[in-house]
Image: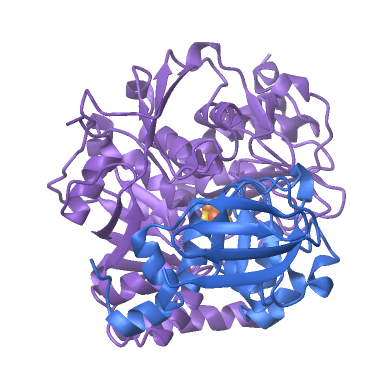
Chain colours: A purple, B blue
Amino acid sequence: MLGKTISEKILSVKSGRDARAGDLVVCRVDCALGTDGSTPMALDYFDAMGGKRVFDPERIVFCLDHYAPAPNRATGLLHQRMRDFAAMHGIPLWEVGDGIGHQLIVESGRAQPGSLVVGADSHAVTYGALNTFGTGIGSSDLAAILMSGRIWLRVPESIKVMLTGCLAEDVYPKDIALALASELGADGASYQALEFSGPALAALDLEDRLVLSNLAVEMGAKNGIFPADDKTLAYLRDRASGPFHAVEADPDAHYVREITLDLDSLVPQLALPHQVDRVIEIRDAIGTPVQMVYLGTCTGGRVRDFHQALAVLKAGGGVAHGVQLVVTPASRSVLETLTRDGTLAEFISMGAVIVTPGCGSCCGTCGAIPGDGVNVISTANRNFKGRMGNSNAAIYLASPASCAAAAVSGKIADPREVHK
Amino acid sequence: MSALELRGCARVISGPRRGDDINTDYIITSRRKRESLDPQVLRQYLFEEIDPAFAASVAAGDIIVAGKNFGCGSAMEVAVTAVLGAGIRAVLARSFSRTYYRNAINNGLLPVICDTQGIHEGDLLVISHDAEMKVRNTTTNETLTADTLPQIMLDIFDAGGLVPYFRQHGDFRV
Ligand code: SF4
């Protein structure tokens, strides 16, 4: 019998059977996230299913992040409904301004090695950075979990992503992820797991890994999982009590495909509108005018992202006239850190618009919506037409440093040139 | 699976990539969801970003036809319920994003994986499944074989979706 991948091992434990790629299993979930984008519908399903009692409220958490703060009466009512349900059933709830659910799942220590954490939102894949099987589900699935604590899953085949070498200056995890999206395509990993491996992992900090796991779904992947190491455990030390059950792949595990990405030769990347896998090297787009620069989201809204962006902005002398710089921290804790260390004050003095921690205008539901004909460069993970609330705007995706480089000149620029 | 036959008119969705990678925001934009979750409201805005004439011309029983990776992007379930709201019972695609696929099953919308390249707008299609799933194009007289659904999905789909399934069983039956 062949060995198992990380995903096969975790789903074996969670389903209580010998789970192999292709099997359909019913698993007990360790935690499930419901956002304001998905939970109201889940509550309708729960009612329709005849739901009375929540199976295990401690394993559920709600987050008000997609409409933060509520931009209209309808969304205000959705929030109220979630608050009422959470209070009635004893479900923890993150309020408006606490941040993006995925970031809070990670910050609160709920994503642990070897665990199965799902989110009724596609970017639940983010938790894979912590050796968690994290995957996105729908509202009906969330309702079934409220009822039973369980979910049906197809055990994915795995693609092994070998990372070698190390990143050059001004090249970032976002560039790795975009290069990978370009290589695999928007459906290159459909129904499959990405399992990251290779000598380059040791140098990637947890915040870096989160970016790679987060983007996995843009290649169609079910999850994007890392092995656990000292950095994983160090991150969890003050956040969760353990014991942790780190899971590694067997040496003879079966992979449907192996791809190797050499970080030494990687240069800054750019995704062109309106597809995440339409990726070119940033130097081939230099000079494209940009009117909005967006720093935030569950991909690029963490402390180090803002530090990287600020370093480039300072080196370049600030924000160009005619550019709107939008700063949306991924969580309150990120905002607090940026406030304490002076980063926020610097952004404000450069004229940045500061938005409540949460999803902001990432999917066009609140925050700063771009106007017609506006080119946006963003640290987000998606650039579909209309994604930020206006189908007459065009969205480019890049690393925080590359976004900042564009803010400096009002044109797409190579961050490696700004320091010089 | 209980024998089922669905007949309808092919509605070929094209979008920026000739039918491939139709994401859920193209099916129904996130900002519409902000106003209402009612499928009867949302159906008016189906595919508005990529095919503004679609919503007004769709008829109950029509069958959506697309390329690969249908329903990629956000996992939002309104991208399934809005389609059902328009009276559509099946979507044919060369492949689906996994979240769209499971949301479809969970709501009783039939996701059919088959080679859709030879299907044209307006073709009359008959989807049948007894032992296996087949799509007959009565306009071109071609018959396509489609992927069959695994057992638990069949059970959920046969029950009419996850809601009736749970009303019946209260939990997953394994
Ligand atoms: S920040 Fe954007 S991608 Fe992340 S959960 Fe919010 S809307 Fe989705």
Q: Tell me if residue B101 can be seen.
A: yes
Q: Is residue A10 left or right of residue A102?
A: left
Residue A412, position in %: x, y? 76, 29
Q: Compared with residue A247, is residue B112 higher up or lower down, i.e. above or below?
A: below
Q: Is residue B157 left or right of residue A18?
A: right
Quarter containing the C terminus of chain B: bottom left
Name the residue at the front extreme.
B141
Q: Compared with residue A217, is residue A253 higher up or lower down, i.e. above or below?
A: above
| Closer to the camera in the image, A215 or A323 | A215
| Closer to the camera in the image, A78 or A301 | A78
Residue at x 58% of width, y 44% of height: A381
Residue at x 67% of width, y 47% of height: B67
Residue B88: which quarter of the image?
A: bottom right
Ligand 1, image quadrant it occupies: bottom right
Residue B163: which quarter of the image?
A: bottom left
Q: Compared with residue A19, is residue A310 higher up or lower down, i.e. above or below?
A: above
Q: Tell me if residue A95 can be seen.
A: no
Residue at x 64% of width, y 82% of height: A73
Residue A363, position in %: x, y? 64, 57
Q: Is residue A292 left or right of residue A103?
A: right
Q: Is residue A372 left or right of residue A368?
A: right
| Closer to the camera in the image, A19 or A403 | A19
Residue A84, position in %: x, y? 41, 85
Residue at x 24% of width, y 31% of height: A249
Q: Compared with residue B161, is residue B68 higher up or lower down, i.e. above or below?
A: above
